[in-house]
Amino acid sequence: MPGSDRTLICACEDITLTDVKAAIEKGYRDVESVKRYTGFGTGICQGRSCLTGIARLLREAGVPAQDLLPITPRPPVGLVPLGELAAMAAGDPDAEPGSGG
C-alpha cells in the first residue's frame, strides 16, 4: 500500500510503528498499557526484542524515564496434555488440567 508504514516494532506479533504511535496518541502512556492495547510483548520473545523500542517511543512522547517500568512477565504455568482438555470439553465437570483425568 502506498504511504503505509510497515516498520515493525514487534515482529512476533506484527505490531508496527504506526500501531504504537496510535496507542500513545490515544493516551496509553506506559509500557503495560501500550502492551495491552497493541499486543506487543506477547509473542515468543515475550518483549525481549521490542521492549526497548516501545520504551524509546514513550520517552520521545514525553513520558518520564521513571514511568517506563518493564512489562509484567506472565510465563506459562505448565503444559496441559490435549487429552485432558478434551475430557473437560466432553463434559467431565470434575476434570482439571494437570490432574490426569
Image (cartoon, rainbow, N blue to C red):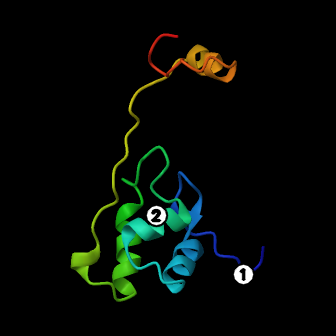
Residue 72, given in percent of the width and then of the height, sits at 33, 55
Q: Which secondary structure, mark 1?
A: loop
Residue that label 2 marks: 35
Question: Does residue 42 appear left or right of residue 55 in this picture?
Answer: right
Left-right relation of 93 to 59: right
In the rendered image of this protein, does residue 99 appear above or below residue 51? above
> Within 10 Å of the Cα at label 2, are there few (<14), some (14-19), or many (20+) other Cα atoms?
many
Which of the pair 18/22 is nearer the observer? Answer: 22
Q: Is residue 9 above or below residue 63?
A: above
Confirm or deny contact between disc 1 and disc 2 (CB under 8 A).
Answer: no
45 to the left or right of 68: right
Q: Farthest residue to the top: give it.
A: 100
Distance Cα–Cα, label 1 vs label 2 = 25 Å
Query: Which percent across, then down, holds residue 23?
Result: 53, 77
Give amino acid for label 2. Answer: Lys
**Left or right, residue 3 beside residue 71:** right
Q: Position of residue 78 (x, y in %)?
A: 40, 27
Query: Which residue is nearer to you in this view: 27 or 98?
Result: 98
Q: Is residue 53 visible in the rendered structure shown here?
A: no
Q: Quadrant of the N terminus?
A: bottom right
Q: 33 or 89: nearer the eye?
A: 89
Would residue 97 be seen by someone viewing this image from the given angle? yes
- Helix, strand or loop for disc 2: helix
Which residue is rendered at x = 39% and y = 65% of the image? Answer: 32
Q: Position of residue 12 (x, y in %)?
A: 53, 51
Q: Amino acid at mark 1?
A: Gly
- Which disc is residue 3 wearing? 1
Image height of 32 relative to 98, above or below: below
Disc sitting over residue 24 in the figure: none
